[in-house]
Amino acid sequence: MSNHRVLPIGITLLCIAPFAGGQALPDGPGKEVAAAHCNSCHPLQARVGAGYTPEGWRTVLRMMANHGIDVPANQVAALTEYLVKNYPEKAKPAGVVVPGPVKISISSWQAATPGSRPHDPLATRDGALWYTGQMKNVLGRVDPATGQVREYALKTPHSGPHGLDEDSAGNIWYTGNTGALIGKLDPKTGAVTEYKMPDADTKDPHTLIFDTAGVLWFTAQNANRIGRLDPKSGEIKLLTPPTPKSRPYGMALDSKGTLFVVQFGTNRVARVDPATLQIREYVLPDPASRPRRIAITGDDMVWYADFSRGYLGRLDTATGKVTEWQSPSGPKSQPYGISVIDHVLWYSESGTTPNTVVRFDPKTEKFQSWIIPGGGDIVRNTSVTRDGNFVLANSLVNAVTLVRILK
């Protein structure tokens, strides 16, 4: 909402130009406030096309304040009312509940800072649940046993922490999605070490994962890169997928240590050989497929969440065969974060009201699903605890959720 800072893609939620996309701002009280603070950047519909609930808009304003975009206190109420009136949340498909045999319990903890926008969760070996506070530039740690929530400030301002993983020493690594960096936090001391991208065009490190050798892999979605960072030397090597604008996104490793990456800008899944660094792409049968997150079962089957079509998909990399199942809430359900627990797929539907937790058993090919209390809004990624429970970060409701699977 500022005319002195260009906000990065993915968080320019309120950057409303006076004539965004050729469309003037609607008349009414608060228009002048919106025009004064949102007078550059991106087309309106590209950022608020789906709108928000009143509480959602209040959260978004807190996110922007956390990111350093200040609206005078005496103008916040008028701006909020203007946005709520003119950009209400559009109808979304209802979250469908599919009954089944599995029982769960769901617990949730609020992030320490309102509007911090938890993006990715991480369950660590010590039993803690971490999150990236993308709009507050922090990493957060939840102790499920005590409910204590602590946030750790990062080094580079507005670095946009995004993906998370843990190394063998218990350090927490993250991608600085708007800071063009990979960061490492030592939870014992709070010290942060940063590794800047070696290429000026690689501005948006996205998701990251350690392989069994301790090498860190990451994606840079809009830069169309897959990266490899050696923590011992700090050396970063960047790979370019064969398909332009393929938007490398989620990642997973198979049992042999081979890296697989879903490409959100196209209907492809990439395979990266860790020894040769060669990339092979598998083409999904529907050109409209846009896989966003990925998980791999013990039989090395690649599973993907097809965000654009509302499908759960399975790729057999040995044969190239693809099998798909419509997600319970339908084609607009937007399957997103996905994990494997005991050979069963668990994922979220992020396009429904409310969001859901979905379980799919490959043996029976049956779904079971539950509503996320509080709405979920929006589960972008998931994690798994050491004892086999499902962890979600809920961005818009500013929470971390633990789904305990009752045995």
Image: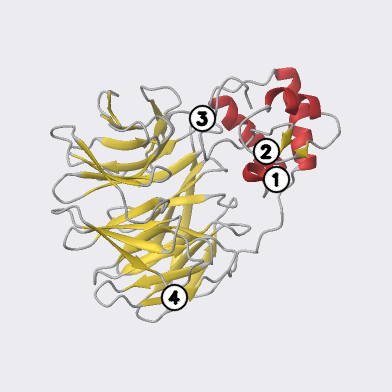
Q: Nearer the viewer, mark 4 or mark 3?
A: 4
Secondary element under disc 4, as helix, strand or loop, is strand
Say if mark 1 contacts mark 2, CB within 8 Å: yes
- Give whichever of discs 2 and 3 has the lower sequence position: 2
Residue 324: which numbered mark, if any? 4
Residue at 29 percent across and 43 percent down: it is 165
Q: Is residue 347 visible?
A: yes
Alpha carbon separation for disc pair 4 and 3: 39 Å
Q: Report which residue position mark 2 lands on.
A: 57
Please give the residue where the numbered disc 3 appears in the rendered image: 113
How is the structure coloured here? secondary structure
- On the image, the x and y values in percent for residue 404 come to 40, 58
**In this rendering, which labeled residue sits more in front, label 3 or label 1?**
1
Nearer the N terminus, badge 4 or badge 3? 3
Three-letter residue code for mark 4: Glu
Amino acid carrying mark 3 in the image: Thr
Q: Label 1 sits on what residue type?
A: Thr
- Whether tag 4 and tag 3 are in contact, CB under 8 A, the answer is no
Mark 3 falls on what kind of element? loop
SS state under label 1: loop
